[in-house]
Image (tube, helix red, strand yellow):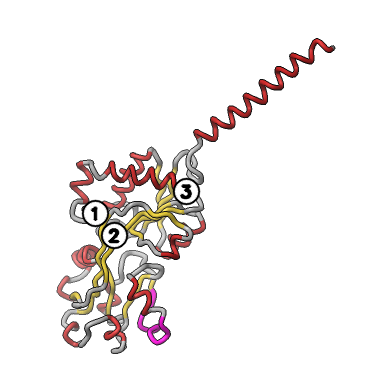
Amino acid sequence: MWSFIPKILVFSILLLVTSQLSAQIAKQSEPDKGVTDCRLRVAWNPWPPFIESAEEARGIHIDLMNWLGDALKCQIIYKRMNWEQSIIALEKGDIDLLGRASITDARKKFAYFSDPYRESLVVLYVRKGESRKHDAESIEDLLKQDFVIGLQKGAYYGETIMRLKEQPEYFDNFPELVFDEGPPVSLLLNRSIDGLLESPYTIDSILLKKHNRSQIEEFPIQIFSEQLHFMLSKKTLSADFVAQLNQALAEVRQTEAYKQHWFWKAIK
């Protein structure tokens, strides 16, 4: 009986070492936390000209996301939801990533941010001919004239707008709206609101398809411009993955496809 003990001990030791080694190999080779077999759940909603279709994820933003997926060797799984829903889902870890995001202190608590990938300019639009009706040199001057500006719920519009909309005397001046298919230009045209904050790229794209460009105009007040980023959930992704995404973004920006389709909107 005693002659079998060394063999049993050797076998037990080998089994223990093998198990530990297998665990280490599995840990080293497993994908980033929350991304099984490198699948990324990405939120989207129609936002021309970047995402053009309401029926499917299609447009130059989707092209960019697919190129990044190829560079990262990740499958992209698109989930349609409006902006407010996507922010909540990212915080909970129900999605992994979304684009066109501004960096804010509140978002830093639950999200990482990539390097910037495009410039954003926000302009105040009013109905044609109404700029000259308002004697105003600032947004606050307009608000004192009972001017109503429609905002996308959950979106960021720069420090000035975000500060003013929290002041009790201006609560009614900033209705927060759910934009399911891009900014609601129709609410501006039917006088439900007096002004709409949006990118010229998006407004021009919508007006070319649905409305007459001559129906609205820019109000001559500077709002804000900034760089936009991809926002990643801290619940499902790591800082290391952000570095991988940034590397992939740098590689994609050198491709001919990117240069042809994104040169007019991209970070220079």
Q: Check disc 3 and report its element: helix, strand or loop.
A: loop
**Numbered label attached to residue 267:** 1
Q: Check disc 1 and report its element: helix, strand or loop.
A: loop
Residue at horizontal 36%, vertical 54%?
Answer: 230
Residue under numbered circle 3: 237
Q: Which residues are magenta?
A: 167-176
**Numbered label attached to residue 15:** none
Q: Residue furthest top?
A: 3
Residue 250's image quarter?
A: top left
Residue 20's image quarter?
A: top right
Residue at horizontal 30%, vertical 76%?
Answer: 187
In the image, residue 55 sits, relative to residue 77, either above or below, namely: below
Work out how far the residue at label 3 is from the one at label 2, CA to CA, in angstroms: 22 Å
Given residues 150 and 189, the one toward you in this image is: 150
Residue under numbered circle 2: 227
Residue at horizontal 40%, vertical 47%?
Answer: 242
The location of residue 34, given as percent across then percent down, is 50, 46
Q: Check disc 2 and report its element: helix, strand or loop.
A: strand
Q: Is residue 174 magenta?
A: yes
Q: Amino acid at mark 2?
A: Gln
Q: Amino acid at mark 1?
A: Ile
The mark that comes first in sequence, 2 or 1, is 2
